[in-house]
Image (spheres, rainbow, N blue to C red):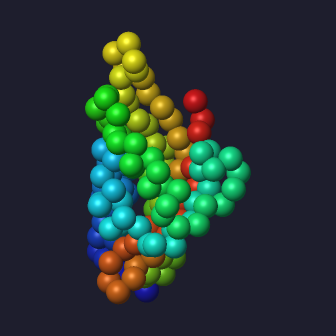
């Protein structure tokens, strides 16, 4: 089992990678999103209307639309990281996304997310997530 220092390093790295992942979604940065994800990423998210999504193409559709006119700011609230041994982890949190609506009025969206990461050949890859919208 990992010692306390390496556990803390893994937790910090996973939170940093999760923030990078969410920022890549906010900026429609497909290159970063693809680099952080396993090609067989599985997902439950509201856009899939209750279906389990397998692979990256479903997600790419939204990146191809671009980031939109409004800048976005993504905040990870109350993160909880559970290491499952040295090579797998569960990261759960509330995701807040601030943006401007069509009238230029600031809005905040709120989501509950659980993301699973797997260490593959020494690098963490995102392998599964579940998002619930909770406005
Ligand atoms: N829809 C892409 C993601 O939340 O990872």
Quadrant showing the C terminus:
top right
Total numbered badges shown on the rendered structure: 0
**Residue shown at 39% from the left, 49% from the top:** 63
**Residue shown at 43% from the left, 86% from the top:** 1
Relative vertical location of residue 118 with respect to residue 13 in this rendering, above or below: below
Q: Which percent across, then down, holds residue 91?
A: 48, 60
Q: Nearer the viewer, residue 67 or 105?
A: 67
Q: Nearer the viewer, residue 94 or 80?
A: 94
Q: Which percent across, then down, holds residue 119?
A: 40, 79
Q: Nearer the viewer, residue 17 or 70?
A: 70
**Residue shown at 35% from the left, 86% from the top:** 121
Q: Which percent across, then down, holds residue 105?
A: 37, 15
Relative vertical location of residue 114 with respect to residue 28 in this rendering, above or below: below
Q: Which percent across, then down, holds residue 5?
A: 29, 74
**Left or right position of 20 against 91:** left
**Left or right position of 81 against 73:** right
Camera sees residue 132:
no
Give the quarter of the image for residue 106: top left
Give the quarter of the image for residue 100: top left
**Residue shown at 44% from the left, 55% from the top:** 60
């Amino acid at each position: 089992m990992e010692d306390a220092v390496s556990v803390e390093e893994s937790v910090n790295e996973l939170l940093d990678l999760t923030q990078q992942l969410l920022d890549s979604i906010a900026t429609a940065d497909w290159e970063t999103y693809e680099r952080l994800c396993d090609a067989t990423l599985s997902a439950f998210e509201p856009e899939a209307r209750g279906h389990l999504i397998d692979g990256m193409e479903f997600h790419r559709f939204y990146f191809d639309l671009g980031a939109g006119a409004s800048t976005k700011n993504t905040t990870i609230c109350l993160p909880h990281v559970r290491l499952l041994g040295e090579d797998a982890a569960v990261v759960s949190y509330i995701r807040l996304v601030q943006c401007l609506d069509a009238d230029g009025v600031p809005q905040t969206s709120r989501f509950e997310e659980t993301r699973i990461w797997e260490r593959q050949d020494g690098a963490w890859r995102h392998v599964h997530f579940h998002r619930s919208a909770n406005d």
